[in-house]
Image (spheres, helix red, strand yellow):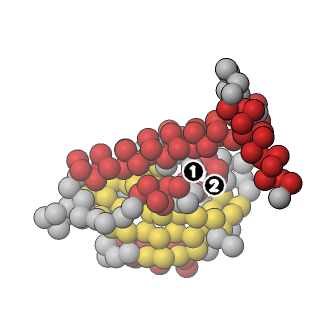
Amino acid sequence: MEFLTYDNAAAKYYSELEIKTLPLVSWDFFSQNFSNNQVTILDNSVLNKLETKNNWETTWDFNYMLQNETVIVVTDSKLKIVFASENINKMNGYNPNEVIGKTPRMFQGKDTDALVSNEIRLAIQNQKPFDKVVLNYRKDGSIYKCHIQGHPVFNRKGKLINFIAFEKIAA
């Protein structure tokens, strides 16, 4: 009961102040959250534009995936990267503009399992989805396990337009 009395008195005191204040610390949380939301909104917007421009036949919720720190990479039909979400930097240290125009093989190295790479290559050749964990390399050369869900993306006429990969660091 004592806390309720204090809370009510504090609320009354602060509501009667001419200038409403917030603790400075709260702006740190707000700023970080605001910045993350802006990046997610921008990435989602670009993905929606790609979807519209290329007449993708999809039902993915890009906004949900981006908010859950899923990295989204889109390539053209020849496997050149045309889009990478901003959160790729958290995963492997690359900025999106550093990977545009390159192939996803740029993330592989000497310890990447050739069998897994071949399975991914065959799925892509056959225009089939795949779900694999691959050993990739960060920009600084360190390795990480990457869980990749890859999908061919077709337009409404059934023509292959892009490939899209949803990636997360694997446990």
Residue position for label 2: 91
> Real-space Cα distance between discs 1 and 2?
5 Å
Image point 50% across, 39% down: which residue? 38
For the C terminus, the image quarter is bottom right
125 relative position to 32: left or right: left
Image point 72% across, 36% down: which residue? 12
- Picture quarter containing residue 76? bottom left
Residue type at mark 1: give it. Answer: Ile
Whether 20 is drawn above or below 38: the answer is above
Front residue of this view, candidates 151 and 117? 151
Image point 72% across, 39% down: which residue? 11
Q: Can residue 23 be seen here? A: yes
For the N terminus, the image quarter is bottom right
The reply to whether discs 1 and 2 touch (Cβ–Cβ < 8 Å) is: yes
Assign a secondary structure to mark 2.
helix
Residue position for label 1: 88
Assign a secondary structure to mark 1.
helix
Q: Position of residue 104 (x, y in %)?
A: 49, 57
89 relative position to 151: left or right: right
Q: Position of residue 151 (x, y in %)?
A: 37, 69
Residue extending farthest top? 18
Q: Can residue 112 be seen here? A: no
- Picture quarter containing residue 34? top right
